[in-house]
Amino acid sequence: MIEFSEEIKDYLVQDNIHGVRILIGQLIKDNEWKDIVNLLKTVTTSLYKKHLLKIQQMVLTIFNLSELVGIDCDIFEEMKSIPEPENIDHATDLLFDNLIQIAHTQFISGGSTLFFDIDKLSKTRSVIIIPDLIEARYRETIFIISEYDEMLPRLTKNWIEASRLWRCGYGLRLLKARNQGLMIHVKDYKEIRNRLAKELGLDLKKITQERNRFIS
């Protein structure tokens, strides 16, 4: 199998995903699936080193599932867990079923919603996870605003450490749009807070009540 690693690497460097798919389709006919997965892991890790998100994005792109890049899992272990596929499209279908279940669990358990693009999801069969994603982003935003609101009266300076906002889907988008950093001024936080509330149709006076609804 190792003899194919340079060929796959060349395809990836040239951004020739079609070439990779054809080669993998050929390999599936005569090789065990787990060996193909190990080959992909070796090649992508060699190319992208410790950039785990890039590795995951590239692997998912190969299987036409790039819209699921925000999935929180070891993508290679998930690939190994599927039955022996008949061809690359079959492999994609099997992997899709697994990843959709992971996404569902990820959202309802309070996991990350980062890197999921609703517009991209809406144009694929992954559209089925959008309701769960929207609900998860609403819930995480409620909790984060509530946490920061409780923190405000205890501040000794007019700056807030905004890592929690950066790690939520809606917060990331607004912080990037405003060119904010890890530390943001209270005034900026309140503007972002109001923007989030408007987008979510949230009455900020009832933030605690809304948070408690998710806790109970």
Image (spheres, rainbow, N blue to C red):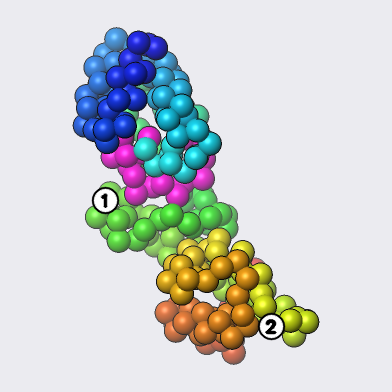
Vertical placement of residue 133 versus 184, above or below: above
Residue 27, horizontal then vertical, whole percent: 29, 16
Any magenta on residue 60? yes
Vertical placement of residue 138 versus 123, above or below: below
Which quarter of the figure has residue 154?
A: bottom right
Q: Residues within 10 Å of mark 1 (few under 14, many from 20)?
A: few
Residue 162, horizontal then vertical, whole percent: 61, 69
Residue range corresponding to the magenta coloring:
59-76
Helix, strand or loop under label 1 = loop
Residue 81, horizontal then vertical, whole percent: 46, 27
On screen, residue 153 versus residue 23, left or right, reads right
Q: Which residue is mark 2?
A: 158
Any magenta on residue 161? no
**Quadrant location, the C terminus:** bottom right
Vertical placement of residue 134 versus 114, above or below: below
Which quarter of the figure has residue 158?
A: bottom right
Residue at figure coordinates x 45%, y 49% from the top left: 70
CB contact under 8 Å: marks 2 and 1:
no
- Looking at this view, name the residue that lies furthest to the bottom: 205
Amino acid type of the residue that numbered disc 2 sits on in the rendered structure: Asn
Amino acid type of the residue that numbered disc 1 sits on in the rendered structure: Thr
